[in-house]
Image (cartoon, rainbow, N blue to C red):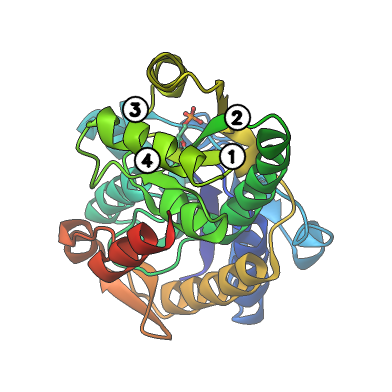
Amino acid sequence: IKTIGVLTSGGDAPGMNAAIRAVVRKAIANGVKVKGIKKGYKGLLNEEIIDMEKKDVSDTIERGGTILGTARCPEFKTEETQLKAAEICQKHGIDGLVVIGGDGSYRGAQALARHGINTIGLPGTIDLDIACTEYTIGFDTAINTAMQAIDKIRDTSSSHERCSIIEVMGRNAGYIALWCGVANGAEDILLPEKYDFNEQNIINNIINNRKRGKTHHIIINAEGIGHSTSMARRIEAATGIETRATILGYMQRGGSPTCKDRFYASIMGAYAADIICEGKSNRVVGYQHGEFVDFDIEDALAMQKTIPEYQYQVSRILSL
Ligand code: F6P
């Protein structure tokens, strides 16, 4: 391996810059050249490729977003596009590619590996919804950002004796909702993996809590359930208690990464650089049981994970 590329793909996540920085610096330390590919697979197809030196990643570890830019690229699913991308890599002398993104981005990496480009995936998503790893780059920052926002909403909710539904991101997964629900001491935590669509339970809970003297009622609703605004209207009509919905949205994806995201992303980026320089391909890096590990992409994509039952049960007991 003489030259590798690095790109970020899919939704951005805080800590991606730490990962890029580590890939660049570790690969160069291993004697390998690095090219940055802008705007994910879209940028690769448009040949938006730049040389990267150690100094090009200075002053980036503390920055949110991704210095390379990112994009979703649905057209990358076709064989024709994948072949074109592999040819572009060859044309630019790129014999290995580190892809930082989620499951969809891994499928692209797998396709490129089939076409002769060595690829390694790094888990970059705030959603924590990648089965082969207990940690994804950006999750820690996103939950801390959301937690702080929810604390603020709780203040005003208590002052006005309102019920607040706060919708957090996570696509179809409820990890952000679970973590914030517990960390913010929410009264109800709605997870797509567990939700039974029985609003009467929530309504009863609100009424009982009000009778017990609680001045607020915080409901954390996951994006995978959604419909927070109409849910708020129905709850207000049923309880007679003013109910407001807040959709936290993209603020959860931005901001300076936490120490944990900077550290884990740095180690994972360096790990990816090492294994790609050794000639490994079609692998993804993960974090399992306290260790950084790598898996075959196909095996990683076949793995499944869901909300841990014990964590869910505890979240229900603690939210009253
Ligand atoms: O995967 C990260 C994420 O923020 C999800 O939580 C959300 O469902 C999605 O991306 C939003 O995607 P987009 O940036 O395309 O609107």
Q: Which residue is mark 3?
A: 74
Q: Give residue 149's quadrant in the image.
A: top right
For the residue pair 43 and 107, the one nearer the viewer reads as: 107
Using a 10 Å C-alpha cutoff, classify the residue at mark 4 as few (fewer than 14 neighbours), some (14 to 19) or many (20 or more): some
Mark 4 vs mark 2, CA separation in Å? 14 Å
The quadrant the N terminus occupies is bottom left
For the residue pair 311 and 92, the one nearer the viewer reads as: 311
Q: Is residue 20 above or below residue 267?
A: above
Q: Is mark 4 within 8 Å of ligand 1?
A: no
Q: Which residue is mark 1?
A: 216
Q: Which mark is residue 162?
A: 2
Using a 10 Å C-alpha cutoff, classify the residue at mark 2 as few (fewer than 14 neighbours), some (14 to 19) or many (20 or more): some
* Label 3: element kind: helix
For the residue pair 45 and 164, the one nearer the viewer reads as: 164
Q: Give residue 121's quadrant in the image.
A: bottom left
* Label 4: element kind: helix
Q: Is residue 121 above or below residue 242?
A: below
Camera-nearest label, 4 or 3: 4
User: Mark 1 is on which residue type?
Assistant: His
Would residue 28 be found to the left or right of residue 109 on screen? right
* Label 1: element kind: loop
